[in-house]
Amino acid sequence: MNSIGGPTGPVFSVVEALADPQISERGLIQDVPIGDETLKLTGSPVVADDKRPLPKSAPPQLGANNGQIWTELGLPHEHIT
């Protein structure tokens, strides 16, 4: 791309990208409470009226929705471990 004048930039690993000061400055990582802990989630890159929508809640903990999913699939709970 450089040889034809195309737009280019560095390619970062996830760790490098999240450590970039611009990520923090733009508020792209949001702290979301989950129980007694705080989970870091990526925020929306879209900003409207100088406001970035915040995550409403953290994702459910692993297995928290199993019963609901099994019911929706018509599976008996006692046979699933």
Image (cartoon, helix red, strand yellow):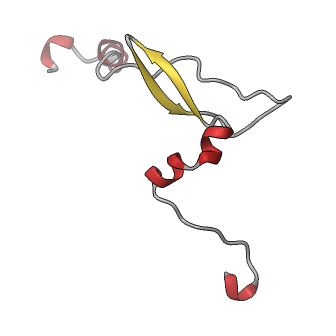
User: Hey, which quadrant is residue 43 in on the image?
Assistant: top right
Furthest-right residue in view?
49
Image: 3 above or below 12: below
Say whether residue 3 is left or right of residue 11: right
Rendering quarter of residue 27: top right
Q: Residue at x 73, y 86 (%)?
A: 4
Q: Is residue 38 above or below residue 47?
A: above
Percent coordinates x, y for residue 77 in the rendering? 20, 12
In terms of depth relative to the viewer, which is nearer, 1 or 26? 26
Numbered disc total: 0
Q: Residue at x 62, y 37 (%)?
A: 28
- Furthest residue to the bottom? 3
Residue plotted at (32% across, 13% down): 71
Viewer-proximal residue, 52 or 81? 52
Q: Nearer the viewer, residue 55 or 32?
A: 32
77 w.r.t. 18: above or below: above
Specify whether 62 is left or right of 79.
right
Residue 59: image location, x then y, percent: 44, 23
Residue lying furthest front in this view? 21
| Image quadrant containing the C terminus | top left
- Above or below, 32 against 14 in this view is above
Q: Position of residue 24 (x, y in %)?
A: 61, 39
Q: Where does the image place residue 45, in percent across and percent down from the top left?
A: 68, 40
Please give the name of the residue rendered at 16% of the width and 20% of the height, measured from the top-left corner.
80
The quadrant in which the N terminus is found is bottom right
